[in-house]
Amino acid sequence: MTDRPRPKKSSPKKSGPEKALAKESAAQGEAAKATRQATQQTEAAKKVGVAQPGAPAQSRKAARKSRQRVPKHAGDNAPKSDAPGADGQNPFRTAMRRSRAPEPATLVIFGATGDLARRKLLPAVFGLWQDGLLGSAFNIVGVGRQEMDDEQFKDYAIDALKTSKETDEIKEGSLEKFRELLYYEYGEFGEDEVYDKVRSELDRAETARGGGKNALFYLSTPPSLFEPISSGLGRQGLQDETEGWRRIVIEKPFGRDLQSARELNDAIHRVWDESQVYRIDHYLGKETVQNLMAIRFGNAIFEPLWNRGFVDHVQITASEDLGLEGRAGYYEEAGIVRDMLQNHLMQLFTLTAMEAPSAFEADAIRDEKVKVLRAVKRIPADRVPEVAVRGQYGPGALDGQTVPGYKQEPDVKRGSRTPTYVAVKLEVDNWRWQGVPFFLRTGKRLPKKVTEIAVVFKRPPLGLFPGGLERNVLAFRIQPDEGVSLKFSSKSPGQEMVLREVVMDFRYDAFGAQLESPYSRLLLDAMLGDATLFPREDEVDHAWQIVSGILQAWEGADAAAPKFPNYAAGTWGPDAADELLGPGRRWRRL
Ligand SMILES: NC(=O)C1=CN([C@@H]2O[C@H](COP(=O)(O)OP(=O)(O)OC[C@H]3O[C@@H](n4cnc5c(N)ncnc54)[C@H](OP(=O)(O)O)[C@@H]3O)[C@@H](O)[C@H]2O)C=CC1
Ligand SMILES: O=C1O[C@H](COP(=O)(O)O)[C@@H](O)[C@H](O)[C@H]1O
């Protein structure tokens, strides 16, 4: 792996008021009290909700039924806010966010009329605001190319909130108040006029709306616009932090290969310091992905086993039952390697394989992630047939319904070579993982939606008893049914010494909390200047280096034509993926 020179320092900057807040001893006292309350609540949740192996389905259902939204953070502004949910009553919220309130700010969403903004971003922002986490001096400027006035955009956004499945329960009067925070500007993103309008919005935010000039620019547009928007903002000096903090959130995919990712980084850094750049990977905002770090580094019992002495291999799966969902324009260009492997799966891999960071702090964590990415054995194009398998789905059936093949999806080229499935074997050349393969697989139109990291342990050295399982498995279920399970052997009741496979199961709903949307978590973190859960420039670069050979082998000028389709929709992918694991191993049946 080659390292590019690191950009300028990237530790999150704390503004004066944030520092002051962090020091506020009264708030800390209250936070400690709230933490104690939260712990008591958690204990209570444990008593009622932790599902035991074989526990009746009813107790799980009951836990789910009784769950409520428990935001992880609460700002000092929460009780003062207009937001209906801002009652400051929730001890979790108070405990976690007490010292981390965002300052007054404007969220500028480029691509505000797009699919992501409509389905995920607007509901995430609304949820944060309704929970009182954004304060009252907050406003949102949607930017798009469609001609609309403020009122039309307000209607559009409110409709999005009413129709998105991601929207939290709407409290009475909330939508009307949230509507007041919304504004809209339009124009061509390649021209200066639109950035001039954005500048005026920030001026208005300061004078008429009681906010400051802090701004978070969220680029929710096709990737081809990331560079033009970044530069356009730069031409207006909107990256300048003299009057307030300025940050830019960049959606994925960050580049379409190593070369273009580097060019994009260079272009971004011509305007922004790395500390202002937030490359978003929504998998890092998932509660259970963060729990992987909590479980690994917050307990003493796992780390001693987390190495080549005990682990046989690791399986990371992100399977989706969905197909294209009308995104052919994007997906035909991207394919599964760019859409899922280079970013989401690589992030899950690094969090599983990295060493413990010295602190739970952005650069300490990112440094460890980069170290493990650098240790991944290179995959030049000629090694690809040994370590990677691709697939594309054909017609099949899911939940008893016939579904078309990829090539029959609207707007897909009939001779398309775009892969919708990939499985890859990564080897890590370091002391911890030498000889322990990591198998990553992801695909569309597989039998169900499951994201999981499974650490598969070695067999016991001696088979003393009949029965039992082959290998212990510690599985982190990222979604759905979020939780952690440990599979082991136990004696079956009776006279005989016969073993049986059993599972110890912790389910996240034991906490009685509805899990927060990853976009809520990440948006708030970006507003707070906390980059811990955002990949740094060199992480993205190394992840591209790892998949470069695969892209070259499958897309290069002399790439052999794949025999697609090679799996039917509703099945677990091509047969060749089974062979990738080698003798004595098989993919988990999920
Ligand atoms: N959708 C999703 O589930 C996910 C999306 N992403 C990423 O988020 C980003 C946005 O995706 P998505 O919302 O799906 O994309 P869409 O195509 O649905 O929306 C893109 C937005 O950008 C606007 N736009 C497009 N071209 C121009 C232009 N030339 N000038 C001005 N505005 C333009 C669109 O305006 P108009 O409405 O007029 O077309 C729209 O507002 C992408 O980077 C994607 O990879 C990441 C994870 C999931
Ligand atoms: O980024 C993307 O992620 C989704 C899957 O995300 P999840 O949170 O539902 O697991 C995927 O469907 C999409 O193709 C991809 O762009």
Image: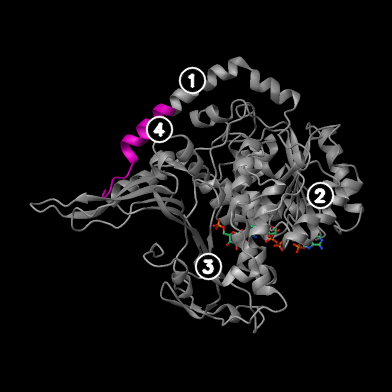
Q: Nearer the viewer, residue 55 or 394?
A: 394
Task: Report the image quarter containing ligand 2.
Answer: bottom right
Q: Which residue is mark 4?
A: 42
Q: Which residue is mark 2?
A: 268
**Circles 4, 1 touching at the beta carbon (< 8 Å):** no
Of the residues shown, which amino acid type is indicated by label 2?
A: Ile
Q: Earlier in the sequence, mark 1 or mark 3?
A: 1
The C terminus: image quadrant: bottom left
Q: Which residue is painted at 54% across and 41% down in the image? A: 355
| Distance Cα–Cα, label 2 vs label 4 | 43 Å
Of the residues shown, which amino acid type is indicated by label 3?
A: Leu
Q: Is residue 270 left or right of residue 81?
A: right
Question: Height in image: 416 above or below 33?
Answer: below
Q: Which residue is painted at 57% across and 19% down in the image? A: 28
SS class, disc 3 = loop
Residue 528 place in picture, x, y as percent = 68, 34
Residue 104 place in picture, x, y as percent = 74, 32
Q: Which residues are magenta?
A: 39-55
